[in-house]
Each structure stands twice: as structure tokens, then as C-alpha cells.
Image (spheres, coloured by chain):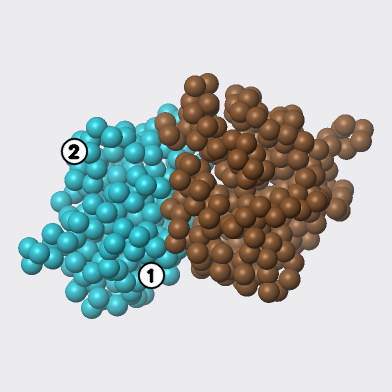
Chain colours: A cyan, B brown
Amino acid sequence: MIVIIDYGMGNLHSVYNALTTIGATCKISSNPEDIKAADGVILPGVGAFEDSMKNLSERNLITPIKEAVAMKKPFLGICLGMQVLFENGEEGNGSKGLGILKGNVVKMVDPSVKIPQIGWNRLEIQRETNLWNKDYLPFVYYVHSYYVSDYDVEDLVAYSDYGSMKVPGYFQKENVYAMQYHPEKSGEDGLAMLKNFKEICDDYTTSD
Amino acid sequence: MYTKRIIPCLDVSEGKVVKGINFVGLKEVGNPVELAKQYYEQGADEIVFLDIGATHENRETMVDVVKEVAKTIFIPFTVGGGIRSVQDMQVMLRSGADKISLNSAVIREPQLIADGAQMFGSQCIVVAIDAKQREDKSGWNVYINGGRIDTGLDLLDWAKQCLELGAGEILLTSMDADGTKAGFDIEMLQAVNAIADVPVIASGGCGSLQDFAEVFEKDAADAALAASLFHYGELSVGQVKEYLKEKEIPVRL
């Protein structure tokens, strides 16, 4: 069972629909017990950094998330759900993130391109990943005005070029997967990534 | 490689896809869920659904269409037509739409753009503008109610206001070009694209592969929308993208 965390941010159903289509069993929940029992966890999200940290805290979800990560459960953050995994977010008045990955989330600045980045961009692969074949460059759908900086280069798997910016698209550190783009809206390429994530969750169950 | 988007548009009424010429003369062409799936498989980057039916029953039907589409295609899709309140937006977003397109209602109540952007994020809010050149050719006026009413508003003034209020994208339809298949209204699109710090989607008039290339080569838009060309099978989304790739315009293939 993969649990999609409901913390009042964004469209959870599109993630749910995509997972169901690739044959995953999943549940939308904000119950810490469900997160504890899950074989894999997804933190989705659309909206503002500050609000999402506030919502996670109010729903007592910060500890269960950190525990799931510590237990080496496959954990996938998507878009805003990816950004809050980092240390700090400068959006709004600035706020602390979950600090699971090293880096800060800052406003994108480049006068040569439109911001937010809305649309499809190709991933340029930095290193091997167990979510897709390294020789293949998937196209993914981005919608964002902020991006991760000061990250640990070893965590970065793939990025996309946007204007003069190198936009970090996908990080992986041990059991933590973090995508700036929306795999659930990235057509067949995105579904293939989610399918591989599901298989990683299945393996986690078996090794239990 | 950031790419230009190709967006098929489906006008939906009473749960069926219809298409008019110059905003009138509707003709039924098919099932929205099936058509959306076909476009998804052809490589569409996004799909726009415009609900052009006016009745309450029609709105309920549209919600069902949106729910079904959300389970069938895995690319972003926008729903517009008859959205008058934050509650209307919420119903469509909850049903699975990724973005909302606002048109006539925000002319009467511009604050709706800001309210929607505040509640759901700017990326959810697409402002659709229908515009027509003034007789003295000094610029363009904004029209509402499916092109029936001239608001007297200047296109560029209105576009600026929409951007200030938090529009995440502008979907710009040329009423002069719509249905003619004589090409996009490049001059009008360029004028808006030059002042817009968010993506501009070109709509109206596309009739050939060259028209798609031209709108991108002339830096008039970030995305191109077409309806009847795709509905009647004159071109497939795949053909358009292959052609653009040959012309060295970045597309997702």
C-alpha cells in the first residue's frame, strides 16, 4: 500500500489516478498510522512553501514523515512536496523545511525566460537512477517559480535547462526520491517512473 | 530543452464535443473522453475543454466528463466556460482539472483572478481573452459572451490588468482569425507576448503546419491551440510536432 499524504495542498487525485492506472494499491490519508503501515509514501503538493509547512505541522505529520524516511521506506516528494524536503524556503516570509535533503528553495531569476516555468522540458541525466534507463532522456511537465539551490551535487540525478538556469529536476538520496516536475502529468514517461517507484515499494514490502 | 506546446481544444456541450466557425454554427463531432484519449496518444502536451453549454444540467455533465478525463489522460488539462466563482473553480479542480480558464466572468469581476490565484496558485489560473481588431486598426478590443459583446476594453490594457491580478497564463483568441484557417493573428499575439511575463497560448486561425511554425518562429506565443484541424483529422498532433522538429522548433517527441 502506497500512502499519498493529504495535507490540504493541491490535487491529490491526479497522483491517485496515475498510481491506480499503473496497478498500485494506494490510499489518500492524513493519518500517521497509515503512514507508519505504508510500504511507500508520496508527498504531493501545489501551493506555497510556508502554508504547506504550517499544514504539515498542524496535522502532526512532520514526525511520521521523518520516521518513514528513517525507516528507509521509499519516499517520493513531488513539486511542492519535493521542495519542503529541503532545509529552507524563501517564499513568503521564509520558513524552515523538513531538512531531509540538503539545500534551499529560492526564487528563479532569469530575465530571458518567463517565470513560472510552465510546460514540458527534457531531463538531462547526471547519473544512474533506478527509476529509468540512463540512456533515455524523458520529457517531464514542470510548473514552478522556485527551485532548489545549494544542494548536495551527489543527490542530483537529473536537471533541465531553462534559460541560463540549470533547474534541478530529480534528486535521489537512498530511499528518498524528489521530483520538481509532475510525474503524474508527464504522460507515459512519468507513468513509467511511478511504476518503477511502485516496484521499489513492492520490494520494500518483501524485504520486511 | 524547454519545448513549445501543442494544445488541442475541445468545445463541449451537453457532454459532447462541438465546434463552431467564427463563433457560430455548431456541429457535433464526438465524445470528449475518447477524443482526449486520442490526442493524448498522439502526443498532445495539454488539452483544453471549453464548456459552452449554459444549463445547470449541462454543468453536472461537464463535471462527469472532467472526472472521466482525469482517469484517462496523464497530461495537464484545463477546463473553462461558464466559471463564475471560486466555488465553480474548486468543483472543477476537485474533479481532476489542473487549470481553470476564466473569460467573461472576470471582465465583470476582475477580482476573481486574484481570488483564484490566491486560493489555488497562479499556475491554475488561465485567463482567456477573445479580441478583435478595431475598425480604425488602432488596436484590439476585448469581447465577451462568445464574441457577442464588445466590452470596449483595449486588449493590451486588459492583458496587463490580468497579469497584475495574478493570471498564470493567457489564452488569446483572435476573433478575426478564428475559423478562417488563414493562420494565427501574429501581430496581435506578438503585442501581448511582448508584455506578458507568463506563457501566452495562441488560438484562432490555424489552418496548416506552416501556421504552427510561424507563430513560434515569430516569437508570438509559447503554445499553440487548435480545434477543428485536429477534430476533423486534417492533421494529427504527431504530424504537427514532427514538422516543428524539422523546423528546429523544440517540441516533446
For mark 1, name the chain: A
Residue B131 visible, this orientation: no
Image x and y of residue B248, in percent: 49, 22
Which residue does the image show at 72% across and 64% down from the upper left? B53
Which comes before the other along the chain, label 2 or label 1?
Answer: 1
Image x and y of residue A30, in percent: 33, 75
Residue B183 visible, this orientation: yes
Could you say which disc has been placed on residue B106 in the image? none
For mark 2, name the chain: A
Q: Which residue is mark 2?
A: A128
Residue at the left extreme of this rendering:
A207
Task: Determine the CA span between mark 2 and mark 1.
Answer: 32 Å
Q: Which residue is mark 1?
A: A7
Image x and y of residue B235, in percent: 59, 35
Q: Quadrant of the C terminus of chain A?
A: bottom left
Residue A8 against residue B114 in the figure, above or below: below
